[in-house]
Amino acid sequence: MKIAGKTMRTIWLAADGRSVEIIDQTKLPHQLEFATLRTVEDAARAILTMQVRGAPLIGATAAYGLALSLHDDASDDAIARNAAMLARQRPTAVNLRWALEEMRAVLADVPREDRVAAAYAKAAAICDGDVETCRRIGVNGLRIIEEIAARKKPGERVNVLTHCNAGWIACVDWGTATAPIYMAHDAGIPVHVWVDETRPRNQGAALTAFELGAHGVPHTIVVDNAGGHLMQHGAVDLVIVGTDRVTANGDVANKIGTYLKALAAKDNGVPFYVALPHTTIDWTLDDGMVIEIEERSADEVLKMAGRLADGSVVTVEIAAPGSAASNPAFDVTPARLVTGFITERGVAAASTEGLLSLYPERRR
Ligand code: MRU
């Protein structure tokens, strides 16, 4: 997608052919800054501190992180150690584990002296694969938006609500939840997005609004608690969110607050879609409630960052001194609340059968 008219990805190989460049998402939306990852520790830190975030992008970053580690030590032991270290950085998004398993499977068949080249090639393939997968999610999701637009008066806008950031900034390009939106906008459908601000880290206000605005998609930021009200008043035609992990029975882990949006959507008859690539499905689990939910620092709840009139970015305290805070980063939406999955292979019911209809090779 484009920033200031320039086509970009979120992660790419640097000109030296060795280090890796990323958009530093902790600086958005106030500054567009890039960071260079030179070591596996840099990659791990970028994932942990959320310089990169979003399930597909942390997978891609981990893949390059493992490639970076091989310059120092390409032994089997070191690969296992570094893969485990990278996987520990964020526990909920299964794409991280998926990408590392893909890397290890390739490296296992390659002699030690060829592993660096093989790892960089595989990491690049993971990135390219993500772009194509997200593009196809967009094509499949576009049909849903087209159907809704066809039921409206000419020129009447289609209102999509989204939570957190499952945009191109969370992937390598296109995004999952946003890909159908970008395609609808590009096709001339008057689409408008309600952007949940997504406390505590404000990925909606800071990132989704930033990237929609950069592409020219009309959008409005709302506080996280506004979604139910908007749905009650007919202001939301459909919800599309991303996900960090879908279990084999169709339960959905995503940014904290997603579950409440799904409940409100169910109560108001608003379609609630989850957009996902195959890399987000955890075929080893049959119940979303057993997914490990990342608990993050209380500081993210107790403090907020913002820009002052003079342009400086500061962090301020927003709570009574001494109060404790709890910060679960994700929640689980049961499959029964999900209207459908939008994947690179098509749209299906959020159920074991629905997933298997798209991925028949997973039938046991
Ligand atoms: O904590 P984050 O910002 O990494 O959480 C991101 C989300 O919850 C996204 O919805 C999810 O990773 C899907 S990204 C295509």
Image: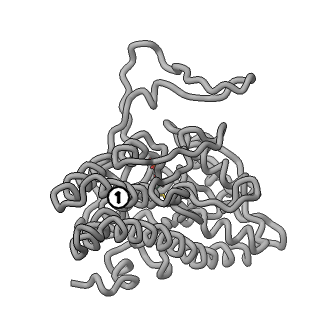
**Closer to us: 69 or 212:** 69
Q: Position of residue 157 (x, y in %)?
A: 77, 64
Q: Quadrant of the N terminus?
A: bottom right
**Closer to us: 216 or 103:** 103
Q: Quadrant of the C terminus?
A: bottom left
Q: Position of residue 282 (x, y in %)?
A: 30, 66
The answer to whether any part of residue 333 appears in the image is: no
Model colouring:
one colour
**Closer to us: 32 or 180:** 32
| Amino acid type at mark 1 | Leu
Q: Residue 71 occupies which quadrant of the picture? A: bottom left
Residue in the picture at 53% in, 21% down: 318
Farthest residue in the right direction? Answer: 154
Horizontal side of 227 relative to 76 (left or right) equals: right
Q: Position of residue 93 (x, y in %)?
A: 36, 56
The answer to whether any part of residue 169 appears in the image is: yes
**Closer to us: 242 or 266:** 242
Ligand 1 has an atom within 8 Å of the beta carbon of the residue at disc 1 = no
* Residue annotated with mark 1: 96
Q: Residue 235 occupies which quadrant of the picture? A: bottom right
Q: Position of residue 65 (x, y in %)?
A: 37, 54
Q: Is residue 325 above or below residue 336?
A: above
Callout 1: SS: helix
Q: Residue 29 occupies which quadrant of the picture? A: top right
Residue in the picture at 45% in, 48% down: 37
